[in-house]
Amino acid sequence: MTSTSPGPRRTVTVAVVQAAAPLFDTPTALARAEEVIREAAVDHGAEVVVLPEAFLGGYPKGLDFDITVGSRTPAGRELFRRYHAAAIEIPGSEVESLAAVTRDLGCHAVVGAVERQGGTLYCVALFFGPDGYLGLHRKLMPTAAERYLWGQGDGSTLPVIDTGTARIGAGICWENYMPLFRTAMYAKGVDLWCAPTVDDRDVWQATMRHIALEGRCFVLSANQYLRRDALPADLHPIQGDEPDTVLIGGGSVIVSPLGEVLAGPLRDGEGILTAELDLDDLTRARFDFDPTGHYARPDVFTLHVDESSRTTVTSSPQNP
């Protein structure tokens, strides 16, 4: 007689970290990142840990860098110099330190950071695993005033990392609103959609549930919880200077492939959300909808994705 038993359950325990690190203090931010990854893995049993956008390097919420259309100031330039100095280089010592942590713990982690490359900064998601540093994704489109600060990524950094258990990808903050970006990621077979963000609005929750339902993937969104007292005293965010003024209000959440909220949203403070994910829910959800598979119409719609690296200057080898 043929067995109809379902077989062993395939699960993975995940965690999203809601926290912030002091602005312009990268050593403290790195120490905090290492601390929360260890806490999530050791105390909560997390095999995949997601940290918020710009956790290393900082998100300068409420600062305008003295920019008006057609005008910059010496004070604004000096503030950018400080922000540039707080960013990290990749490869670099901060990446090596985080890689050592995930190697030691045997877990995977997705960490938001600000990358420094020459005079340009990029908002990035860094991928780590039991083998150390695995790669990065550069945010394709900085939003609004972020364009003062960050350059644009290109198609060469759109990885989906196969952990052997599930495939992990990342969309940073408002990239999650880009339908063609989402389609490209769905086509790569992303199972765990990681969304490092600083968007604390209630409508963000609808976006996270929509992506889970549209992509038939688990969504892990990690947001910062940032107060005024995490900024240096000489800065004056538009929200006000009272130490307990909330600049970024959290809202971290974990969602199932059918759009059900499994944990969160977390408000009013720092914390770690965890969930044990049944990976067979991915197949159950894709039974009636697979956005780039059986529910696609390639005879009507196609998407071309250029994953080449774009550089300003290229050099040909000299003739001998």
Image (cartoon, rainbow, N blue to C red):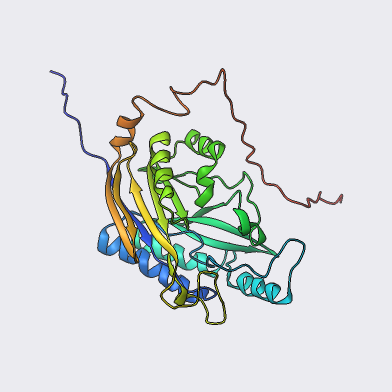
Residue 232 position within the rendered picture, expressed as x and y whole percent measured from the top left: 52, 79
Indicate left or right for 281 with 196 as reference.
left
316 or 214, which is in the foreground? 214
Name which quarter of the figure residue 246 lies in.
Answer: bottom left
Determine if residue 216 is in view: no
34 or 57, which is in the foreground? 57
Residue 93 position within the rendered picture, expressed as x and y whole percent measured from the top left: 53, 70
> What residue is rendered at 49% in x and 59% in y?
53
> What residue is rendered at 44% in x and 54% in y?
201
Residue at the extreme right of the image, as rendered: 319
Residue at the extreme bottom of the image, as rendered: 233
How many tags in the picture?
A: 0
Q: Quadrant of the N terminus?
A: top left
Indicate left or right for 70 with 42 as reference.
right
Determine if residue 1 is in view: yes
288 or 64, which is in the foreground? 64
> What residue is rendered at 64% in x and 74% in y?
79
Indicate left or right for 225 with 6 as reference.
right
148 or 183, which is in the foreground? 148
> What residue is rendered at 85% in x and 51% in y?
318
Residue 287 position within the rendered picture, expressed as x and y whole percent measured from the top left: 33, 25
Residue 118 position within the rendered picture, expressed as x and y whole percent measured from the top left: 69, 64
Indicate left or right for 288 with 188 as reference.
left
